[in-house]
Image (cartoon, helix red, strand yellow):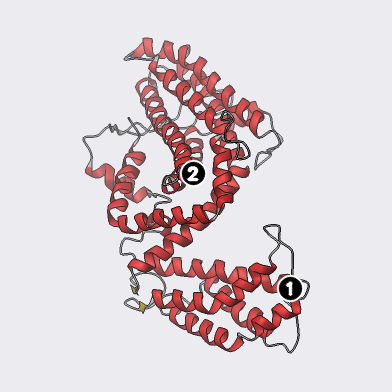
Amino acid sequence: MAMIADEVLKAQKCKELETKYGNVRKGLRMSLVTFLKDNPSYEKLIEGFVGIDPADKKTESKRNFLDEFSEISKLMDDTFNKLGDAEEGALAHKLTTVSAIYMERIGQTCMEAKLNYFPLHKEKFAMHVSEEQEVKAIVPRTTLKTIKNYLDKWFFLMQQYSVNAKAKIIYMKLSDFRDKLHNFEYIMGKSINKLQKDYIKEIVPFMKDTKLALLRMRKFFEAIDASAFGKMIKALTDVAMENGTRVYVKYNSVLTIVQGNVRKGSVIPVQTIVDKYDNFMFPIRQTVAELDTKLGGSRQKDPAKAFWDIASQITSFRDGMHSVIDEFSKGISPSDEDFKFFTHTVQAVLIPYMNQTKGEVNDTFIIGVRNLDTFFWKIMTKAIENSQEKGEKMDEIVGLAVRVTNKDLEAFLAENKDMVEDEVAGEIESGSKENASSASAQTTAK
């Protein structure tokens, strides 16, 4: 499958990360098996997006927006398969006929899918302009990058959850579409690169059709991300990040700081920190969970009793949190916003509240406990990232993302001068005189 240079480099980096952090990712996948087993509500959500009705598994699977991917994938393949090995004038003629037809079909399929499955979705940046005006402002390369960012967010997450048979179905659908999109981007750039000097008039109408197709595809992806599916992805991402961080700590109980705005060489006993935090937070978190209404439960009639249950833990909680803060400060800058918020929540929200002579567990206290959990793992993530020699981020470590910087790409191209890169032809300038922008050199990879 052909792809442009940054995707080639991303695939290489993905393999390197898998090798380097293989034990962490394997441990994460094992923990996700347990998580889904203990949280059947998430598996029901996954079943719904696969097309299975959780209420009646004997019924035939229902079609949903993920099934539209296969249709769009086929259209992307057909678009350039029709071009064959055509050169010069023959290629220019085909671009304005065969491919233009398929571009229109891709755009129409994306628009219908959005309307059918997400009719109430509003574009994130409603500019109150016509679609024709929007198309003029579209930059194909940038728009494709936006689409791929959405796709990769879903793809890499479901790859980790593919230990679950139903989640694996979603992963396979995303994987197939992702491959076809990369090939689509490569062939489009390659075709335009052949013609850009002598066939500007033929390229301009083709690019108009292309930009419309990409605009509608981007809107379709925005709608997916803003839907219940997107909310599920966010929730499962939070779970994977926390579980992955716990697994990393299990394999690396002590961190040596090599980056960040702190003293290099500092050592943080992260396993000890996690053990302390879990130990001192357990009784408080348990009480809060019993009072939580998020999952449809009901608050206890006597929140004051719950308050005293928690308040009795004040001494151990205070000492434990201060110890956690002291250990973290060895590898996290005191000026870090997340660290300051964590410290503030402990010192200005929870401890004074628990020191009162009377009170009750209310929403303010519950929010404080949740915030503490959230920012604890954010700080732990930063500590782990500050211990990475090559600066890998936590989502890369656990397999939820792969990043390629411009610097990485420049170095890669400098080392692979024998490869010919085909960047997707840049933007078509709007106005009375439309000119095709220059295309960069391009890289082929099989």
Q: Is residue 294 visible?
A: yes
Pointer 1: residues within 10 angstroms few (<14), some, or many (20+)?
Answer: some
Q: Amino acid at mark 2?
A: Trp
Residue located beneath label 2 in the image: 154
Q: Badge 2 local density, few (<14 within 10 Å), some, or many (20+)?
A: many
SS state under label 1 = loop
| Residue 296, placed above or below residue 250 | above
Q: Disc 1 or 2, which lies upstream in sequence?
A: 2
Quadrant occupied by the N terminus: top left
Residue 74 falls in image quadrant = top left
Residue 398 sits in quarter: bottom left
Indicate the position of residue 370 as horizontal and vertical percent values. Answer: 61, 68
Q: Nearer the viewer, residue 118 or 239?
A: 239
User: Which amino acid type is marked by label 1?
Assistant: Asn
Up/down of 269 relative to 203, above or below: below
The structure residue drawn at horizontal position 53% and vertical position 87%, both measured from the top left corner, is 319
Percent coordinates x, y for residue 102 in the rendering: 50, 17
Whole-Å distance between the Cαs marked 1 and 2? 36 Å
Estimate the x, y position of residue 360 in percent, counting from the top left.
Answer: 75, 78
- In the rendered image, the quadrant that contains the C terminus is top left
Name the one closer to the observer, 82 or 69.
Answer: 69
Q: Does 51 sit above or below residue 233?
A: above
Which residue matches tag 1?
A: 362
Total numbered labels: 2
Q: Is residue 386 visible?
A: no
Residue 196 is left or right of residue 132, and the answer is left
Q: Residue at x 49, y 19 (%)?
A: 206
Image point 29% across, 47% down: which residue? Answer: 15
